[in-house]
C-alpha cells in the first residue's frame, strides 16, 4: 500500500517572493493533511525564480529528509524535458516538424511508416505505443537491437488517423531520431546533457551518470497494479480496466521491458542508469522549472527561435478521426512531445499556449508563455490521478487563480476567462 507518514512542520522549507504566499500555504497544507512524504515545487516567472519550496522525507521508510538539492525520478514528466532536445534541433534548422521521419532515419519507413511525419510521431499519432520485440534493460541505451525493434514495429492504427499515449516508446523514438539528426550522432541522453542541461546549468539527467551521489535521490513510494482498481474514482475507469487486461494496448504500452511495469522499480540503480527518455528522468524539481521558465520567457538560454516557440505554443494538430486516446481511453491532446490543454485538463492561462507533461503519481512540469511561467512539482509518494493530482493542482490553482488572477485550475471550478490576453500578461 502507498506509504503515509507524519511530516513535522519544521521539515517544510523554502521561500517565495512577495505576493506568492498562497503557493507556500498550499504546499504546507499538503503536508499538514498527510498527503505527502516528500515533495518540491518551484516556479519561474519571466526568467526569475519566484517560488522555491521543498520538504518532507526523500526516503519515508528510512526517515531521511528531503533537502534543497534532492533529486527525484519524475516518470513521464521526463517527456517534456526530453522533447526540449528535439526543439533545440528544430531551432538550429536541423529538423523540420513536418518532414517525414524516414527522411532522417530511412529504416523507419518499414512496416507502413514511410509517410509518418515528425509532428505525427511526437504527437502520439504514429500508432507506435507498443514494441512487440521483447526488450531487456541492457537494450535501452541506444543499442542496435532497440533501433531495429523501433524501425520494424508495425503501427497499431493508420498513422495520423488516431492518437494514443506513447507512454514508454516516445522517448526511444525521439532518441533514435536525435541521433540521426545531430551532426555528432549523439543519442538523446548525451545530447540533452550537453546541449540542454549544460547551457542552463540544470541538475537533471536522462540516464543517471556513473558516480552520481545516490544519497541525493528520493525514494519512490509506489503502488501495485491491483491497487489501481481501488482508486477508479481518481483514475479514469476505462483506462484502469483496460490496464488490468495484459493483452490490451493500454497494458502493453507499459510492459516492455517488463521491469518497467512496476513503478517502484524506478528506484533500481540499473533502471535509473538506462536511457529511457519518456520515463526515467531524474533531477532537481528546480531544474525542470528553470527549463520551462526559459522557454516561457523566450528561450534565450537554449537558443530557441520564434518559429520554434510558436510551434510549441500553437494549438495541436488533431488526428483526423478525433481525440479519443487509444491507450488512456478518454479524449486527450498532444503536440510535439507535449500535452496541450484540453477540456478535462486545463492548465496555465486561458490562451491555451501552455505546454508540458505530467508524470505517473502526480508530478507535472509546464511552460505558460502567456504569463511567462515555468512551473514544476514532483513528489515521491505516488498518487492515482493521470493528471490534476489534488496536491499538484492545489499549488497550480494557488499560483494561477489566486496570485496571477488567471483561469482557475481545479477541474471542478475551471472556467475560461474572457478578458484580453494583453491584460493577462505580466507587465
Image: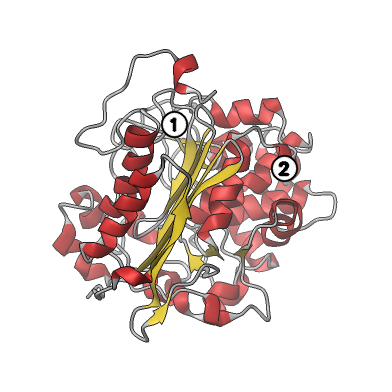
Relative image position of residue 280 (x, y in whole percent): 52, 65
Q: Is residue 85 left or right of residue 45?
A: right
Dot 2 crowding, Cα within 10 Å, few <14, some 14–19, many 20+: some
Q: Is residue 232 above or below residue 343?
A: below
Residue 373 in sight here: yes
Which dot, 2 or 1, sits closer to the camera? 2
Identify the residue position indicated by label 1 in the image. 161
Element under disc 1: loop
Circle nearer the N terminus (2, 1): 1
User: How many discs appear?
Assistant: 2
**Which residue is more in the foreground, 90 or 3?**
3
**Which residue is more in the foreground, 14 or 160?**
14
Q: Is residue 10 above or below residue 396?
A: below
**Quarter of the figure that contains the C terminus:** top right
Relative image position of residue 94 (x, y in whole percent): 78, 38
| Gap in angstroms between the C-alphas marked 2 and 1 | 36 Å
Q: Residue lying at the far bottom in this picture: please name it.
A: 62
Q: Which numbered marker is on residue 303?
A: none
Q: Residue at x 67, y 37 (%)?
A: 299
Q: Is residue 13 left or right of residue 48?
A: left
- Quarter location, residue 417: top left
Q: Residue lying at the far front in this picture: please name it.
A: 18
Q: Residue at x 49, y 15 (%)?
A: 422
How was the colour assigned to the protein in this rendering? secondary structure
**Which residue is more in the foreground, 20 or 329?**
20
- Quarter location, residue 293: top right
Q: Residue at x 30, y 30 (%)?
A: 343
Relative image position of residue 319 (x, y in whole percent): 44, 29
Element under disc 2: helix
Q: Is residue 130 left or right of residue 403?
A: right
- Quarter location, residue 246: bottom left
Identify the residue position indicated by label 2 in the image. 301
Amino acid at each position: 500500500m502507498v506509504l503515509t507518514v507524519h511530516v513535522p512542520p519544521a521539515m517544510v522549507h523554502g521561500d517565495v517572493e512577495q505576493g506568492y504566499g498562497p503557493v507556500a500555504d498550499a504546499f504546507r497544507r499538503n503536508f499538514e493533511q498527510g498527503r505527502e512524504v516528500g515533495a518540491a515545487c518551484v516556479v519561474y516567472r519571466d526568467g526569475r525564480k519566484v517560488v522555491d519550496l521543498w520538504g518532507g522525507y526523500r526516503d519515508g521508510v528510512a526517515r531521511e529528509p528531503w533537502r534543497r538539492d534532492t533529486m527525484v525520478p519524475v516518470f513521464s514528466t521526463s517527456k517534456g524535458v526530453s522533447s526540449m532536445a528535439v526543439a533545440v534541433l528544430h531551432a538550429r534548422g536541423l529538423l523540420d516538424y513536418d518532414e517525414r521521419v524516414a527522411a532522417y532515419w530511412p529504416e523507419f519507413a518499414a512496416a507502413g511508416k514511410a509517410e509518418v511525419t515528425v509532428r505525427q510521431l511526437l504527437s502520439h499519432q504514429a500508432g507506435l505505443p507498443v514494441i512487440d520485440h521483447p526488450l531487456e534493460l541492457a537494450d535501452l541505451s541506444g543499442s542496435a537491437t532497440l533501433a531495429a525493434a523501433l524501425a520494424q514495429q508495425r503501427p497499431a492504427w493508420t498513422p495520423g488517423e488516431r492518437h494514443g499515449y506513447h507512454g514508454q516508446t516516445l522517448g526511444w523514438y525521439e532518441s533514435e531520431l536525435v541521433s540521426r539528426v545531430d551532426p555528432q550522432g549523439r543519442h538523446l541522453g548525451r545530447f540533452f546533457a550537453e546541449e540542454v542541461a549544460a547551457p542552463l546549468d540544470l541538475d537533471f539527467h536522462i540516464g543517471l551518470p556513473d558516480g552520481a551521489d545516490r544519497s541525493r535521490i528520493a525514494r519512490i513510494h509506489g503502488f501495485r497494479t491491483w491497487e489501481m482498481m481501488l482508486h477508479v474514482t481518481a483514475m479514469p475507469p476505462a483506462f484502469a480496466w483496460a490496464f488490468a487486461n495484459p493483452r490490451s494496448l493500454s497494458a502493453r504500452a507499459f510492459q516492455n521491458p517488463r521491469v518497467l511495469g512496476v513503478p517502484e522499480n524506478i528506484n533500481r540503480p540499473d533502471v535509473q542508469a538506462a536511457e529511457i527518455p519518456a520515463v526515467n528522468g531524474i533531477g532537481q524539481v528546480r531544474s525542470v522549472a528553470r527549463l520551462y521558465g526559459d522557454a516561457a520567457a523566450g528561450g534565450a538560454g537554449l537558443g530557441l527561435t520564434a518559429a520554434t516557440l510558436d510551434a510549441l505554443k500553437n494549438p495541436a494538430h488533431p488526428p483526423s478521426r478525433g481525440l479519443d486516446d487509444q491507450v488512456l481511453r478518454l479524449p486527450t491532446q498532444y503536440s510535439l512531445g507535449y500535452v496541450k490543454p484540453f477540456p478535462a485538463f486545463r492548465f496555465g492561462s486561458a490562451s491555451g499556449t501552455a505546454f508540458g507533461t505530467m508524470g505517473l503519481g502526480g508530478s507535472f512540469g509546464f511552460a505558460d508563455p502567456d504569463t511567462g511561467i515555468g512551473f514544476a512539482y514532483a513528489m515521491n509518494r505516488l498518487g492515482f490521478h493521470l493528471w490534476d493530482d489534488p496536491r499538484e493542482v492545489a499549488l497550480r490553482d494557488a499560483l494561477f487563480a489566486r496570485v496571477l488572477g488567471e483561469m482557475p485550475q481545479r477541474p471542478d471550478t475551471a472556467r475560461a476567462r474572457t478578458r484580453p490576453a494583453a491584460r493577462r500578461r505580466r507587465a
